[in-house]
Amino acid sequence: MVTVIPEVETAAAGADAQHARSARRRRRILGENPLGLLLSAPYLIFIGVVFASPLVLAVWMSFHDYFFAAPGANVDRKFVGFDNFIAVATDPAVWRSFLNVGIFLLINVPLTVVLALVLATALNKVVRARVFLRVSYYVPYVTASVAVVGVWLFMFSDTGLVNHILGPLAPVPSWLINPYLAMPTIAIFVTWKQLGFFILLYLAALQAVPQELYESASTDGAGAVRSFFSVTVPGVRSATLLVLLLATITGANLFTEPYLLTNGGGPNGASTSPVLLMYQKGLEQGNPDVAAAIGLILVALVLIIALIERRLVGEEES
């Protein structure tokens, strides 16, 4: 009787330990709240079908001699290794497109962060007509690019409103047909169009900054500018990281604006983006394998830039 009890206790302890390990394993897989995983499952499936599966297909295409064929046709698509990537690396048009999108990001991303934060801070202090002003900034974002492009073509054409105001100072050739000004003009257009969305992100973040911090800064003699840099900027750093990432990702996927504003990347490829070049090579020229290789390189570069942004903002936050 005395020897049985320890054995029973040992077995019970082993069962409890096994149960604890199983519970920890389930928490690692399902998280602390499995219901959240269940509720997010439809979106995860959507991401897998719409984004992950095309990415896997793009990887396969980039390593094969892929071409379009009739539905149901059984064709042999040979494995070509890195031939498509070599073709991309030796194509001057590809290098030009990545340079163009680099110029775009250098203008668009800092301008978006600065303007969105400054305007959101100003709007957060407005008392009268607050809703009207917020909606006014958001309207361009929800307006179709096709509709807005017509206005910008009218403003920045040879005989447009901007050149009429500038008079003899107007550039020759004009903005959208100038190889040096086409991409900066597109960057300004995209910044203006998407600014309302990023203003809303900053407005939401500003609500979480305690008002006591501003009162303390004012008591210490800080003015509006000092309070902005000492309280507002650190208080919305997480939102700044989000704005940086979203602006970088959307900017790297630039397609509609150069396609519409410069008639498909003109003049002479000065505003061609990598995504627009993928469209031209994949659909217009019938080389989807090369287009897939360009897309994978673009994805890798965007991930690297995003990691750098995360590291820089994370170090400042720490």
Image (cartoon, helix red, strand yellow):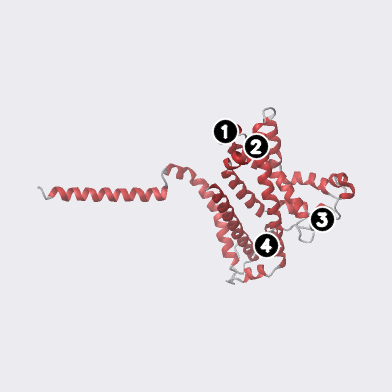
Q: Which residue is mark 4?
A: 282
**Is label 1 in a helix, a strand or a loop?**
helix
Distance (Cα) linking label 1 and label 3: 52 Å
Q: Residue at x 71, y 56 (%)?
A: 103
Distance (Cα) linking label 4 and label 2: 44 Å
Sequence-first disc among 4 and 2: 2
- The amino acid at mark 4 is Gly
Sequence-first disc among 1 and 2: 2
Residue 228 vertical position relative to residue 60 in the rendered view, above or below: above
- The amino acid at mark 3 is Ile
Single out the mark in the foreground, 4 or 2: 2
Find the residue positioned furthest to the right: 168
Q: Alpha-carbon neighbours of circle 1 within 10 Å: few (<14), some, or many (≥20)?
A: few
In this picture, residue 279 sits left or right of residue 49: right
Q: Alpha-carbon neighbours of circle 3 within 10 Å: few (<14), some, or many (≥20)?
A: many
Find the residue positioned furthest to the left: 1
Q: Alpha-carbon neighbours of circle 4 within 10 Å: few (<14), some, or many (≥20)?
A: some
Distance (Cα) linking label 1 and label 2: 18 Å
Single out the mark in the foreground, 1 or 2: 1
Q: Which residue is mark 2?
A: 121
Q: Which mark is residue 177?
A: 3
Image coordinates of residue 28 in percent, x first then y, are 40, 50
Q: Which residue is mark 1?
A: 216
Distance (Cα) linking label 4 and label 1: 59 Å
**Is label 3 in a helix, a strand or a loop?**
helix
Q: Alpha-carbon neighbours of circle 2 within 10 Å: few (<14), some, or many (≥20)?
A: some
Image coordinates of residue 127 in percent, x first then y, are 67, 28
